[in-house]
Image (tube, grey):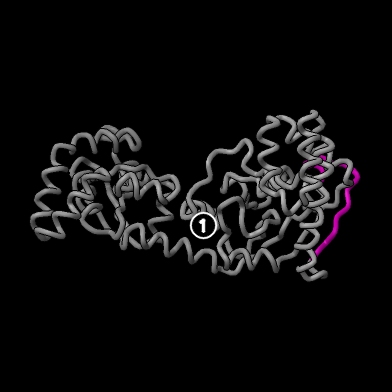
Amino acid sequence: MSRAIEAKEFFDLSLLHQVFDVRTPAEFEHGHIPGAFNLPLFSNEERAEIGIIYKHQGREAAMVRGMEIVKPKFMEFIRMAEKFAPLPPPESRTDDNTTILVHCWRGGMRSAGMAQLLGWWGYKVFTLKGGYKSFRRMALGSFLQKRTIRVLGGSTGSGKTAILEELGKKGATVLDLELLANHKGSAFGSLGEQAQPTQEMFENETAVRLLKVPPDQMLWVEDESQNIGKRIIPNAFFEQMRTAEVCYVQIPVELRIEYLTREYGKFSKEELIRSIEKIWKRVGPQHAKAAITAIRNGDIKKACEICLVYYDKSYAHGMAKRQAASVLKKPFMHMNPEAIARELLQ
């Protein structure tokens, strides 16, 4: 038993039930619905083979070859589905505990075929009208939605990420773009992070979080440039960030240097030097060379002091582009993220 549904209903159900993406591993890796499991009907090579047959021999020949490939895999598909969405004993099955979601690229034969097989096995299957393409349209549309945004600002080393985390713990709705991008947003941002997701996957992850938040609900985000490493915040959402109210956390420079020394002192000298080399021209060759010398001498604090001059100028330049009336400055003589978050929410 299966039924095709629209993207919004499919997304709502995906918050409760397992999604199976039957596209190839390559398609899935490029971008997928967050939380989905890849249950490919065809491997990358098999799909390429079928495409060639379709082009040169026609639809019927391609379908025959497709069925030849798929038929021996039936039990493998069922075992994988059961692994991620176990079926209860027949006597205790309900619509709720047997529901799964299946989709392909355009909502065509791949998802229909898998839905038929898993429906026969005992699942209640919903497929996605228009396939993954329709999810992408909904995801990209989420960035156009007008939202109530509050930006957490502060010069480099102010502990904004830690403050944002504390805001979330205290019940505020937060969107941690750096977490989704696997990058801290500076030349040093990749240190200690996993590889960045594809741009499409970064957009999908961000969109899913936005789709869960009512547009009129206050959403806290950290002040960012549009590029977070190699990932780009979608234009429509970034423009809203740039015009939103900013809570600018002012932390004494001495505390920021101490914070940066602790945060980056755990990385190797080679990693830190490579990061400085990325901003060699922007920092200035003389300052960059001095920072690298300090690192080689084990003086991470001195290196942070040198680099912070550049980052403070850069951040001040970005803040100058905002409307002054939209910037609420909040000075603190300490660096306690929990206490700062508590005060920001008062």
Name the residue: 65% across, 45% down: 184
Residue lying farthest to the right in this orientation: 333
Name the residue: 35% across, 36% down: 84
Q: Nearer the viewer, residue 245 or 83?
A: 245
The quadrant in which residue 161 appears is top right
For residue 24, side relative to residue 328 (left or right) = left
For residue 162, side relative to residue 305 (left or right) = left
Residue 174's x, y, as percent?
A: 65, 51
Residue 345's x, y, as percent?
A: 77, 52
Name the residue: 52% across, 58% down: 211
Residue 32's x, y, as percent?
A: 40, 50
Whether residue 334 appears in this view of the structure is: yes
For residue 81, side relative to residue 321 (left or right) = left
Residue denoted by label 1: 207
The quadrant in which residue 17 appears is top left
Under circle 1, the secondary element is helix
Position of residue 151 relative to residue 337, above or below, is below
Q: In this picture, which residue range is highlighted in magenta? A: 327-340
Whether residue 169 appears in this view of the structure is: no
The quadrant in which residue 188 appears is top right
Disc 1 marks a residue whose amino acid type is Ala
Q: Is residue 75 part of the magenta span, yes or no?
A: no
Position of residue 12 relative to residue 19, above or below, is below
Name the residue: 55% across, 57% down: 210
